[in-house]
Image: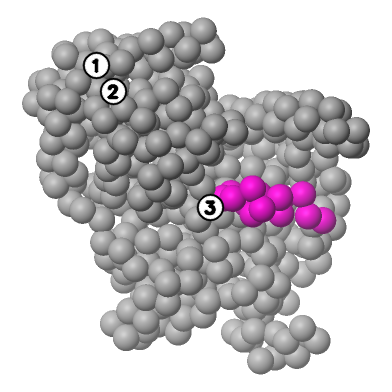
Amino acid sequence: MKLRFFGAAGEVTGSCHILTVGEKRILLDCGMIQGSRRQEQRNRDPWPFDPATIDAVVLSHAHIDHSGRLPLLVRDGFTGPVYTQRATRDLCRIMLKDSGFIAEKEAESENRKRQRKGLARVQPLFTIDDAAYAMRRFRGLPYDKTTTILPGVRVRFRDAGHILGSAIVELMLEEGGVTRRLVFSGDLGQTGAPILRDPTIVRQADLVLLESTYGNRHHRSRDETIEELAEIFADAGRGGGNILIPAFAVGRSQELLYFMSQNQDAWQLERWQVFLDSPMAIHASEVYARYSHLYDKEASDLWSRRGGGPNLLPHFTLSRTPTQSRAINRLEEGAVIIAGSGMCEGGRIKHHIKNNIWRRGCHLVIVGYQANGTLGRRLVDGADKIRLWGETIRVAAKIHTVGGLSAHADQGGLLDWYDGFDGRPPVMLVHGESEAQAALGQLLSEQHGAAVHIPEPGEVYDLVHSHFLKPSGRAT
């Protein structure tokens, strides 16, 4: 009974770990590495294991840094089931198809350049067809039901409160008469976050695999965040520009619309045209609508009163087509534009940045994590010039970082969630940068008496004997 760490060990993206129970091998997540072009090139590296030897995948949620390499896994030989929460299955159908579309377009663009230089063609990372084929392997499960997925392996999904369908994964394992309970946090949401229920408290575990994205940070309170957004809208209204909000299509876009609907009078949103300029976010919002039974009470009540959809806001437009998106660029003021990608690395937001970032009246509102090497991170770090499609563009817009909207628990939230366990089980910190992991690990140890380890890629932990193995297989 062993756990081997691959992706999101010592970094945030690319979540991927292998659990071995007897002769069976289970992959926990199969995420894409995101960030700079160099970092994303690692998605093309050979697998550190044979995909054909994996018996099942257990997927915590739909975000691409957790699910994005599943089409590659299937294409390269995986034939088993992918178990996940039902809403996650439906979101993955949208997100993986979109990733395949982007990969095809990027390869097409690169090949035009390579053809002019007489270079060999490149293949897309995966295609739309690869994504559709991978979806055949998905098996949707409800929250809170224990299911046997392999001999000696039972799984139960608990609500993680991160995005729709996000799950804390409980794995009940048995091998040779020995039982162990592994709890994988996936990505934990904030307590009191909009729309979704709070992360479920889990009591029992022999080992906790815990995310640490914001292990060294405290988010602003929800009330302070509401006030900050109100000030941005007021400032932008006086300055006569547009508001650009790069937002992840799943989770963040829906939360923003929810906040706007809640505060439309206080923020004077009747003065603004609000555009959701992301086909994927529009499709994701339709999935959110189908799973309204997973909302918290406040969101359910608002959805019932407003009827959902276009009725959420007074001047709200779903921008589905490229033509509709280009038309927005004719507006020099009075537009709130929510568009992907969330880290400004692709999608329609880059075009809106090109058309607005040099205007002094423009406001760019960062509402999510920005990985090292991304355009969003450079803007947050104060870049005064950026390069887009070979053109150098001056940054004159006002850049805001609104941390209270994060879909991740902060340091206090992570500590509080761990405090729910009985007996202080040992913790493996994953899905975080080194500074965040070091800070969280120190507090878990000092305040909670937890044995904490920060695994490196390739390390193997023996769950039966509770120790790490050296590369030779011996204990360490």
Q: Under tag 2, what secondary structure?
A: loop
Residue linked to disc 3? 373
The residues bearing labels 2 and 3 have C-alpha atoms spaced at a distance of 26 Å
Residue 91 at x, y percent in the picture: 54, 31
Residue 463 at x, y percent in the picture: 62, 78
Q: Residues within 10 Å of mark 2 (few under 14, many from 20)?
A: many
Residue 36 at x, y percent in the picture: 59, 50
Q: Is residue 4 left or right of residue 309?
A: right
Which residue occupies the foreground of this view, 344 or 212? Answer: 344
Residue shown at the point (68%, 77%) measured from the top left: 460
Which residue occupies the foreground of this view, 96 or 4? Answer: 96
Residue linked to disc 2? 242
The residues bearing labels 1 and 3 have C-alpha atoms spaced at a distance of 31 Å
Residue linked to disc 1? 334
How many numbered callouts? Answer: 3
Residue contact between numbered discs 1 and 2, judged by CB atoms under 8 Å: yes
Q: Residues within 10 Å of mark 3 (few under 14, many from 20)?
A: some
Residue 163 sits inside the magenta stretch: no
Residue shown at the point (42%, 72%) measured from the top left: 435
Picture quarter with the C terminus: bottom right
Residue 87 at x, y percent in the picture: 50, 34
Residue 34 sits inside the magenta stretch: yes
